[in-house]
Image: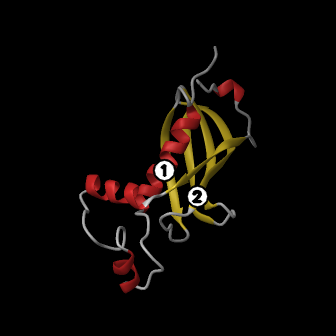
Amino acid sequence: MTRYYDDVEMGDDMEPEELVATDAAVEEFCEVWGNPGAGRFTDNEAAKSEGLQGAIVPGILSMAYMARFVTRWAGGGSLKKLDVVFRQMVFHEIPLRLVGVITDKNELDGENQVECDIYLETADGDRLVGGKATAVLPSKH
């Protein structure tokens, strides 16, 4: 579905997306990323030896989830900018939710830009990663 700039208003919530960063998904990501093998991202014991509760999701994978969230929401649009702040560790195999809200709209440099605050949070609403994104959406006109 194409999302149009004309149909988006400041204060609109983005449709939430639920996910679980599974052990298998993190291992596959680490293989593609070029960081295979046991470590704090893929092995609970290695992570515990570093003082963590268990294996953690790499920050760049959390960013990828957030980028995908905005891109899916944008429909026929695109992600122009993503800036994130890592507040807490993201652990494997827990229910997560991506949420967002539209904070601004601008027509700049011939583009219909939509600013949004986005968060990767636990199912209980504990915000683990926060960010700001800019999407460019097509116009109906």
User: Which residue is found at the position 33% from the left and 59% from the top?
Assistant: 27
User: The C terminus is located in which quarter?
Assistant: top right
Q: Residue type at mark 1? A: Tyr
Question: Which residue was labeled with disc 2?
Answer: 96
Residue 127 image offset from top left, x and y in percent? 63, 64
Residue 115 versus residue 7 in the image, above or below = below
What is the number of the mark on residue 65?
A: 1
Looking at the picture, tell me which residue is in the foreground, 77 or 69. 69
Picture quarter containing residue 114?
Answer: top right
Going by the image, does 17 lie left or right of 103?
left
User: Which residue is found at the position 70% from the left and 32% from the top?
Assistant: 8
Picture quarter containing residue 7?
Answer: top right
| Helix, strand or loop for disc 1 | helix
Q: Are marks 2 and 1 in contact (CB under 8 Å)?
A: yes
First in sequence, mark 2 or 1: give its number.
Answer: 1
Looking at the picture, tell me which residue is in the foreground, 120 or 77. 120
Residue 53 image offset from top left, x and y in percent? 48, 80
Residue 87 image offset from top left, x and y in percent? 55, 69
Q: CA distance from mark 2 to mark 1?
A: 11 Å
User: Which residue is found at the position 43% from the left and 62% from the top?
Assistant: 59
Counting other residues with Cα less than 10 Å from the Cα at mark 1, is it few (<14), some (14-19), or many (20 or more)?
Answer: some
Q: Residue type at mark 2? A: Leu
User: Which residue is found at the position 34% from the left and 54% from the top?
Assistant: 29
Picture quarter containing residue 140?
Answer: top right
Counting other residues with Cα less than 10 Å from the Cα at mark 2, is it few (<14), some (14-19), or many (20 or more)?
Answer: many
Residue 73 image offset from top left, x and y in percent? 58, 36
Count of picture labels:
2
Image colouring: secondary structure
The answer, for residue 58, to whether it is visible in the render is yes
Residue 112 versus residue 27 in the image, above or below = above
The answer, for residue 119, to whether it is visible in the render is no
